[in-house]
Each structure stands twice: as structure tokens, then as C-alpha cells.
Image (spheres, rainbow, N blue to C red):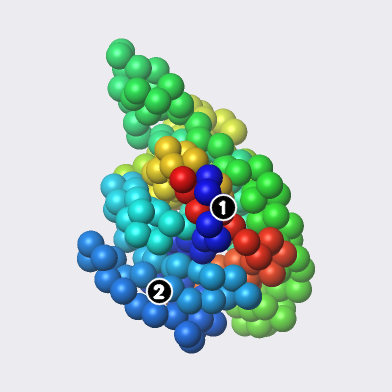
Amino acid sequence: MSDTAAPLGLVAALKRELRDLLAAMPDARLRTIGGREFWHGTLEGHEVVAVQSRVGKVAAAATTAALISHYRVGAVVLTGIAGGLAPGVAVGDVVVSAELLQHDLDGSPFFPRWEVPLTGVSRFPADAVLAERAAAAARAALADPLALFGEALVQEFSLHAPTVHTGLIVSGDRFVRTREDRDTLCAALPDALAVEMEGAAVAQVCHEWGLPFVAIRAISDRADEAAHGDFSRFLSAVCAHYGAAVVRRLLAEMPRTLRAPA
């Protein structure tokens, strides 16, 4: 790492996941690179570059590589929503990554299942300090759900007491939407808490660049037959509130200076 001050990279797959954060960055300058829109501004006193990656691992990896190479960010935070896997992970909870894995990657017999070929790594760890700060920020942001979401949303999504979990998030290029698929994932990876489509790819790019990374995922559905409807409604009504509340609280508690990659 160099001694050059660096911005924080903020990534989400969908524009709606960034909506409230972008609204809090009225000074942001917009630049398009490789078909992606990057907003460079300030948030909670930090220099921030926010970008919509689009959906899936390839899109997320390409976006993260562009973010790092063009803006020399000092850390990356992925925000957005995910499906709950573990029995105790409910809609409205938050999962902070301790590690991330591609559940649909299998290079056997040449490489062990889930291992990224030629890296020797299957589980990419999140930065421990950043993950601890993110979990604390989530607990603080969600301490008063009524103030954050309002009575109607609290009742609709049972957001009376959201829980914050830290652990394994798994990523793959398909939307998990049946109990059978969810149960298969849980049987193969019993410690997995949540499933989505970008996190492990972003984590791999950050690992290769030596950058701190964490994913913060609000649980929109239980990765079952109701997932499509639950996901769509949660995305439109709730997810932006989660991202803005947790990320802004995280930034408020972070050191003011990050370091750019060497």
C-alpha cells in the first residue's frame, strides 16, 4: 500500500440499492467508464466513489477492477440485498461477510470444489476490522426500526427487531428461488448464512489487489418459492434505507484517511 490518501469504493449491483446514498452525495461528479456510471463525491466527511456493478459475478468483478484501477480506492464496501440461507437468518436481518465463496465454481478433478483455480483459495476473507465496524454500524443503525422505516414497513416486513449476523456469504450466477435449491446449498455449505450474485467476485478482485473489503447484505427473502415477490417488494420499498443507514453509520466511525493500493 502507498501513503497516498484514497477514496472509499462503494459498490452495489442495482441502482435502487444506491438510491439513498447517492441522494446524500449532492456534490458527486458523474463519469462513465466501460459502460458503468461512477459517482465521485463526499459522504459523512469521506471521499467516496459509488458505482452500480450490475448483476452477476463477471459484471461485479469487471466493475471492481475498473473502480480500483481508475480511482485508486483504499477499501471497497459492497452493499445491497441477499437471500437468507441459515434457519436463523430472517427477512429484514443483515449479514456482514466474514468470508465469501463462489458456490457454483467447480474445477474438479483438477482443483478442489469451490477453489478458484491457480489461487489456492476458496473462501476469501473480508477485512476483519472493516467487518467488525460494519457489524457495529448495522446494529446501531437498526436499533430503532420504527424511526428508520416507519410503522407501515415495519409491519409489512416484520422489521421489529432485525438481527445482525457475521459469517459466510456465498455467490453464484443464478437466483436461488426454491426450497430444494436452498436446502442443497445448505447441505453442501452448512455455515453459509446468505446467498447473492456478486460478493465473492468482488472479494476475489480486492484480495488480488490487497485491498480491505466487506459485504453488507440486507436479507430480502428466504431463497424459496416466494423469493421473487419478496425480493422485488423489498428492493423497491426497503433496501435503500438499509444501505444508507448502515453505510453512513460505518463511514461516520471510520478513519478519515485510507491508503491507495501500491
Residue wearing tag 2: 39
Number of marks: 2
Give the side of residue 1 with respect to residue 53, left or right: right
What amino acid type should be assigned to the residue bearing mark 1? Answer: Asp
Q: Quadrant of residue 11?
A: bottom left
Counting from the top left corner in percent of width and height, residue 7 is at 51, 63
Residue that protrudes farthest toward the bottom in the picture: 26
Counting from the top left corner in percent of width and height, residue 61 is at 34, 48
What amino acid type should be assigned to the residue bearing mark 2? Answer: Trp
Examine the rendered structure and indicate whether residue 48 appears above or below residue 129. below
Q: Toward the viewer: 123 or 205?
A: 205
Q: Residue at x 63, y 75 (%)?
A: 44
Residue that protrudes farthest toward the left in the picture: 35
Give the side of residue 56 with respect to residue 4, left or right: left
Q: Residue at x 68, y 47 (%)?
A: 129
Residue wearing tag 1: 3
Q: Residue at x 65, y 49 (%)?
A: 131
Q: SS for tag 1?
A: loop
